[in-house]
Image (cartoon, rainbow, N blue to C red):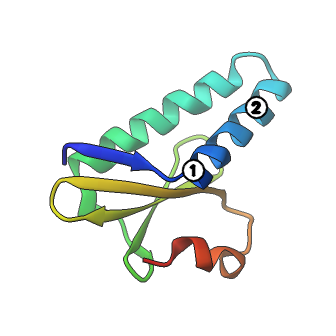
Amino acid sequence: MSDVWFLRQALADLRAAHSWYEEQRPGLGDEFADVVHDAVESIIAFPAARPVAYRETRRLLLERFPYCLYYRIHGDKTLIVVACLHVALDPKRHQSRLRG
């Protein structure tokens, strides 16, 4: 994989989570960002290794934080991150975002 794209809503999810963690403890938002970065690197290395959560959208549970990255594989060179959602959220509520 060579390209990773984030949908606007996925970026908004990440910013909101980062801000929330930063409010809880200064620096924790940056730790969250580091975990997301590591997760994206893992997806790049092994894109098809994660389970399909809905249609063509795959899910990766983040380390240390109760969030999942949802992404799609587009062709053989592009990953599209469509959402970063808290695990406690009802997935049916977000299916429209996960559709391929």
- Of 69 and 78, nearer the camera is 78
Q: Residue at x 76, y 25 (%)?
A: 22
Sequence-first tag of 1 and 2? 1
Q: Which mark is residue 73?
A: none
| Amino acid type, residue under disc 2 in the picture | Ser
- Left or right: 16, with 3 as reference point: right
How many numbered marks, from 0 up?
A: 2
Measure how far apart labels 1 and 2 are at the Cα level: 16 Å
Q: Which mark is residue 19?
A: 2
Residue 3 location, quadrant:
top left
Residue 21 location, quadrant:
top right
Numbered disc in front, either 1 or 2:
1
Mark 1, residue position: 8
**Residue 38 on image: x %, y %:** 40, 35
Q: Image quadrant for the C terminus?
A: bottom left
**Residue 66 on image: x %, y %:** 65, 51
Crowdedness near tag 1: few (<14), some (14–19) or many (≥20) residues, C-alpha within 10 Å: few
Residue 94 location, quadrant:
bottom right
Q: Residue at x 33, y 45 (%)?
A: 4
| Amino acid type, residue under disc 1 in the picture | Arg
Against 84, residue 74 (above or below) is below
Q: Secondary structure at mark 1?
A: helix
